[in-house]
Amino acid sequence: MSKGQVLVLGSNATQIGLRGGGTATVGQYLNETAVPALALLDAGYDIVLATPNGAKPHIDAVSFSVDHFGGDQTAFQRAKDFFASHPAMNDVRSLRSVVEGGLDGFVGVFVPGGHAPVVDLMQDHDAGTILRHFHTAAKPTALLCHGPVAVVATLDDAPAFRKALEEGDDAGAADLARDWIYSGYRMTVFSASEEKIAEEQVLKGELFFDMEKALRSAGGDVSVTDKNFASNVVVDRELITGQNPASDQAMADALIEALDRAAA
């Protein structure tokens, strides 16, 4: 018997803008999607995947590497098979249909990382509606790597907030984030120093803003590790955030613990 349904918010973004007018190909990270999802299934929970347009998320090609699975070829293959063929990864709903169908039946929500959520989820109206529901109901809300930036979708005008960040308008961004529901929450996210490495080695260009700045501008109490790509998970009330790809299993463990505790 299932312990309950956990909603997974995926992204449909495949490109992100760079300073100077270029773009880079992006997507969700395989391990950040599959490791927590498989852990939830193994723990007895069901998962429902939803994206802004209802199409299956794109996986960033950079994440198709055994290195993100500690060199474990078996775990890497299991993740690839899971994303390719498991019904939960292929029976995708739109965020709008999930909202219209009602959110009370979900026991928790999870947002994977990769750069993709920075493009769509952080300014998606339905994502904001969903996250506000889980905040109000104090249900476990877990976000990984770049995924934590999705919490700014709960702002009254998230697209304007994102535009202010892109334009370097710190005062404007702060003004738009007044009375943010997560203001003062302790959280973590893909660090500015980690982003510099990603920009140089993967994106081949500079983003308009880093994730630490985005969340701090909104009012988050953001902390990151001194060592790049070291696992780091921060829990504050219902909010569970993981800093980077290496935090996948630790974040999954924290989410499952919170779900089990809520059920008990």
Image: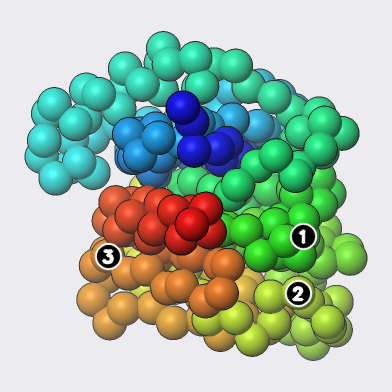
Which numbered tag is attached to residue 241?
Answer: none
Residue at the image point whose x is 31% and y is 17% from the top:
81
Label 1 element class: helix
Circles 1 and 3, Cβ within 8 Å, touching? The answer is no
Q: Which residue is mark 3?
A: 231
Q: Which residue of the protein is positioned furthest toward the front in this rendering?
A: 264
Residue at the image point whose x is 40% and y is 39% from the top:
40
* Residue 157: % across, % down: 88, 63
Q: Is residue 187 above or below residue 83?
A: below
User: Which of the pair 235/85 is nearer the observer?
Assistant: 235
Query: What kind of residue is marked 3?
Result: Ser
Apparent side of residue 123 relative to residue 58 in the rendered image (left or right) = right
* Residue 30: % across, % down: 37, 35
Going from N to C along the chain, the mark reached first, 1 or 2, is 1
Compute the Cα span from label 1 to label 2: 8 Å
Q: Which residue is mark 2?
A: 181
Circles 3 and 2, Cβ within 8 Å, touching? The answer is no
Label 3 element class: loop
Circles 1 and 2, Cβ within 8 Å, touching? The answer is yes
Compute the Cα span from label 3 to label 2: 26 Å
Which numbered tag is attached to residue 132?
Answer: 1
Residue at the image point whose x is 25% and y is 24% from the top:
78
Query: What kind of residue is marked 1?
Result: Arg
Apparent side of residue 176 relative to residue 195 in the rendered image (left or right) = right
Mark 3 Cα within 10 Å, few/some/many (few <14, many 20+)? Answer: some
